[in-house]
Image: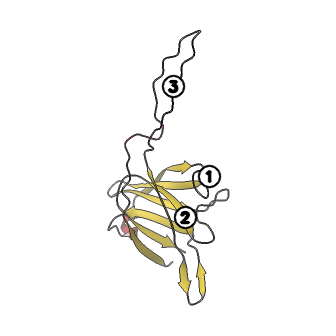
Amino acid sequence: MKKIAIVCAIFLSAVIPVASAISVDVQNGNSTDMGANEIKTGFGMVTGSIKFRIGNVSWTPSEIWMLPADMDPEIFSKGLSQREVIEIPSNVTFSTCRTAVYHNSTVGYGFKVYNTGTTVQIMQNGTFCGLAYNGTYQVFAKY
């Protein structure tokens, strides 16, 4: 299993959790206009393109990981548990942007971008979309 490390600084604003509420007062017999509202997500998005190359042959990674800066993947993998999957709809980017969130109680969160049986996060040209919490990460590609 070969890995390539690409350092990627991601400064994401995580102010409000994904499931947020806006207060509205509704009364019988009346119509209430909430107006236009925007809610910040509890994560940010990174897009880019990664391909491996040998001579004239290139291919896309099977997985892309975003791990805490200066973190050895072998150390991060110890005591790892998957927490959740965060996702934004396909009409926001070139595909459904879906990322698995992993947690190591000693070093924090890591994020895995990969294709599933029903969604494509890493396109044939190497373009990908990943989601992550506020922080600075190293991006590792795996084939």
Does residue 39 lie above or below 130 as drawn? above
Inspect the image, locate mark 3, and give the three-letter code of the amino acid beneath it. Answer: Met
Numbered tag placed on residue 128 in the rendering: 2
**In percent of the image, x 57 and y 9: which residue is there?**
28
**Could you give the CA–CA distance between mark 3 and mark 1, rounded to whole angstroms?**
26 Å
User: Which residues fall within the magenta stretch?
Assistant: 13-21
Numbered tag placed on residue 34 in the rendering: 3
Q: Position of residue 127 (x, y in %)?
A: 56, 67
Residue 32, quarter of the rendered image: top right
Residue 140, quarter of the rendered image: bottom left
Give the number of marks. Answer: 3
Label whose residue precedes the other's in the sequence (3 or 2) = 3
- Residues under numbered marks 3 and 2 in contact, where contact means CB atoms less than 8 Å apart: no
Does residue 78 lie above or below 17 as drawn? below
Q: Where is residue 76 in the image (x, y as percent from the top left)?
A: 38, 64
Q: What residue did someone put label 1 on?
A: 90
**In percent of the image, x 43 and y 68: which residue is there?**
139
Label whose residue precedes the other's in the sequence (1 or 2) = 1
Does residue 14 lie above or below 10 as drawn? above
Inspect the image, locate mark 1, and give the three-letter code of the amino acid beneath it. Answer: Ser
**In percent of the image, x 64 and y 57: which residue is there?**
119
As helix, strand or loop, the secondary structure at mark 3 comes to loop
In magenta segment, residue 31: no
**Could you give the CA–CA distance between mark 3 and mark 2, rounded to whole angstroms?**
35 Å
- Quadrant in which the C terminus appears: bottom right
In the displayed structure image, the side of residue 103 where residue 130 appears, left or right: right
**Which of 92 and 14 lies nearest the eye of the viewer?**
92
